[in-house]
Each structure stands twice: as structure tokens, then as C-alpha cells.
Image (cartoon, grey):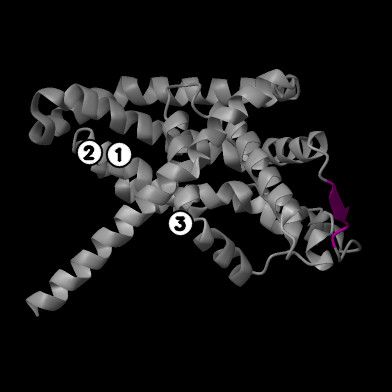
Amino acid sequence: MSSSVSAALDNQVREISTLASDAAFSGAWLYPIHGVWYTLRHGLYRTLVPVTLKILGTALAITAALFAFTYLPQVAFCALFSGPLAFATAAMLVLGEAYALVMFVAKAFFLGQAQDQLFNAVFRQKGIPLVYVEHKGKGRGFLQGLAKGLSRPLNRFSREGLLRYIVSLPLNLVPVVGTVLFLVYNGAKVGPTFHARYFQAKGMSPAARQAFVEKRKGAYTAFGTATLALTLVPVVGPLFMLTSTVGAALWVCDVEREREREPSVGLADKRPVTATQT
């Protein structure tokens, strides 16, 4: 029994070390930073002023309210685990909670559409065609269309992702190491969501999408971890969701160029990227 447990632990250690190595050497953690630079350099920020003001207002209000009403009680609680580091640990917890609330509000009401627009804009500027196909069922009834319109914002928010995030928040009670584990764990899950637009455009089946992500698991972990670390910056952090979307689009543009250079890629795989308009 002990030998099987030991073997399982060895396998886990090897998988984690391989994932960490792939993440470090993939360079994908640089794309969120490239996204910030590209957004500023190419003037994409000009189209984001309205949504930026909404995000900043939401983030400021939520963060201030949480610090005002929940910070000190959480300091008292964290003192049981972190001792003199309780003030810093509680601050990380509050920032994490603020991030979850801000992301819920932002994604539900105004962030998703802005991310789609940014992704499309990068594709246009990079000269990679993104062809839209009108959604079937265009003639659906008024009530069906209204119901779809009202439910669409909430569909952008992953309840599973929120639950995973909340459950892993206590990791921050362990100074430094716990925070790193928290970022990596959630980053590995968050990373692929930034390419949802690309998966849709390519018409990938769930199995094809899973295979694509699995092949780049280390890279997606690196990208998601770097993005999550940026978004935890107080108040302005949610804005990095937008610049990281730009970074994700730049990454996928590089992927498309690599596919074009591969001699083994068939003509059927070199078609323009298409998407369903929703």
C-alpha cells in the first residue's frame, strides 16, 4: 500500500515539475505584458474609455467597501494562522474577494463585449481575417430573442470558476507560498478562457479544444497565472483583463503564423478564421 502511495506521489511530483518547466520556458507569461504595451502603442485604449470608467468605478466602490467593513475582522481571523503577517494576509484575502465581486459585475454587464471587440481588433491589425457567419435561427420570435439577450451577460460568467476561486481563497492564509499556489491553481484554469473567442472562430469541438489546451497546458498555466497576478492589483487590476485579452489575441496570432509556416498543414487548415456572430 505504501509503495503505491509513494509511486503516486512521485508521479504527481514529476507532473508538477514538468508543468512548471513548460510554463517557465513557454514564454506565455510575457503575453499579458505584451498586451499592455500593444494596447497603449496602437491606441486601442481610446475605444475603451467608457468601459474603463465603469470598471474603475465598480472596482473602487467594491474594494473600498470590503476594506471598510471586512478588513479588520479578517485581520483578527488571520492572526490565528499568520501571526504578525496577519495584516498582509488579510489584505490579500480582501483583494481576492474584491476581485471576485468586481469580475462578477464586470463580466455580467460590460466586460465581455469589450473583450470580444479587442480580440477582433488585434486580428484585424495583424492582418489575420476573422470572418463572421450569421447565427442560424435569425428568425426566432421576439420573446426568444429577448430571453437570450437577458441571459447572455450571465452566461459569460463561469459559476464553476467562481466556486473554484472562492474555495481556493484560504490558500492565501499561508504567507507567500499559499498565494503562489492560489495564483497557479486558478491561473491554470483561467488561461484557456482567454482563447474562447479563438476556439469559437475555429469551430473547435469540445474534444479538439481540450486537445489544443492540453498540448499547451504549461503555457496556459503561465499565461493565466501572470494575468491573475495583474488583475489582483487594487482598483485598476480589472483593467488588466482587457489588456490580457489583447495579449491572448497576440498569442493566438503567433499560433496562426506558426501553422502557416508548417509544411505539413493542409490547405483545409489554412482557411480564414471564422466565427459565429452572437
Whether pointer 2 and pointer 1 mark residues with C-beta atoms closer than 8 Å, the reply is yes
Q: Position of residue 74 (x, y in %)?
A: 21, 30
Residue at the spot of label 1: 180
Q: Residues within 10 Å of mark 2 (few under 14, many from 20)?
A: few
Residue at the spot of label 3: 160
Tag of residue 177: 2
Q: Which type of secondary structure does the marked residue at label 2 adopt?
A: helix
Which of the marked residues, 3 or 1, is nearer the chain's N terminus?
3
Does residue 12 appear in the picture of this structure?
A: yes
Which of the marked residues, 3 or 2, is nearer the chain's N terminus?
3
Q: Is residue 237 above or below residue 148?
A: above
- 3 left or right, relative to 175: left
Residue flagged by tag 2: what amino acid is it?
Val
What span is in magenta? 129-135
- 142 left or right, relative to 8: right
Q: Quadrant of residue 66?
A: top left
Whether pointer 3 and pointer 2 mark residues with C-beta atoms closer than 8 Å, the reply is no
Q: Which type of secondary structure does the marked residue at label 1 adopt?
A: helix
Whether pointer 3 and pointer 1 mark residues with C-beta atoms closer than 8 Å, the reply is no
Q: Residues within 10 Å of mark 1 (few under 14, many from 20)?
A: some
What's the residue at 8%, 28% (across, down)?
83
